[in-house]
Image (cartoon, rainbow, N blue to C red):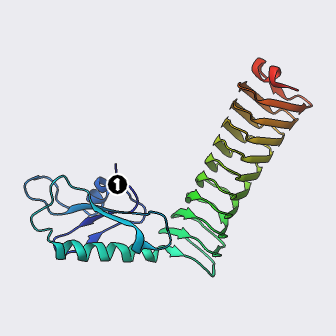
Amino acid sequence: MCHFLSVLVLRDGSVRHHPMLDSHGDLVHYFKLPDENPHIPYFAKAELTPTTDWTDASTWAWRIDEAVNPVWLTPDVEKAAEEATRAIAQRMVIKDGEHRLIVDGCWIIAGAAKIRDVRSGRIVRVQDLATISNVWGSATISNVRGSATIRDVGGLATIRDVGGSATISNVWGSATISNVRDLATIRDVGGLATIRDVGGLATISNVRDSATISDVRDSATISNVRGSATIRDVGGSATISNVWGSATIRDVGGSATIGNVWGSAELDASAEKAVR
């Protein structure tokens, strides 16, 4: 399976890389490299994978992803390719300062960096005290940790793998957030936004409009649900409180509890049993 950061090594030690692609097969097609004859390898697949420090590419793990290395892949050629790939990775890191706009590329946001506007491209890691605001279009953000803050997320934006004490606020449009854990906080969710796979001690509050939250477990907490929002597949010791409007809750199990339901909120039989 291919991982970030994937490259193709050429005979001269140069590499081919695209910031939006992690599949070696996609890179081959994108760069139109010959790949018909297995006995004549024109490139070698390689990966540079983050280890403990995402902000220092010199610490990342390098490997050639081939069962048998091409005869032309000498130590000197591989060294040149590895150095080129580490340089590409290090240029992705933003650790400080205020940056007005991201419209493409692949980035790692850390330290106290502030990103004011993300319209496309992808952010593969957010950590420390980094702040990202105004995420929209088809932008993708993954691996949010530490005390990172993301706010104002809309359009078709996707955020996944949120943990630590990270905070995400003001989610709308058709934005999707998945895999929320630890002490992460998500608040003010509306429109057609979708949040799924919520666990740990994560907190979600102020859910409205036609937003959907699914797969809630562990000791996660959801509060202040209104409009026509939907919550489904709730288990573990999860807690849901303050539900009103025409909100819907269904498929509740484990020792999950629901408190303070008003208005025309609709609960199925499993949800009714969880009301305290």
Residue 219 position in % (x across, y down) = 73, 39
In the image, what residue occupies the spot 18% across and 52% down? Answer: 67
Q: Is residue 145 left or right of residue 224?
A: left
| Up/down of 189 relative to 218, above or below | below
In the image, what residue occupies the spot 78% across and 41% down? Answer: 222
Q: Nearer the viewer, residue 167 or 267?
A: 167
| Up/down of 93 relative to 18, above or below | below
Location of mark 1 (residue): 23
Q: Residue furthest top?
A: 269
Mark 1 surroundings: few (<14), some (14-19) or many (≥20) residues within 10 A: some
SS type, badge 1: loop
In the image, what residue occupies the spot 23% across and 67% down? Answer: 9
Residue 237 position in % (x across, y down) = 74, 33
Q: Nearer the viewer, residue 88 or 235?
A: 235
Residue 276 position in % (x across, y down) = 88, 26
Q: Is residue 66 left or right of residue 51?
A: left
In the image, what residue occupies the spot 61% across and 74% down? Answer: 111
Question: What amino acid does circle 1 point to?
Answer: Ser
Q: Is residue 106 visible?
A: yes
Residue 142 position in % (x across, y down) = 55, 57
Q: Is residue 17 left or right of residue 224?
A: left
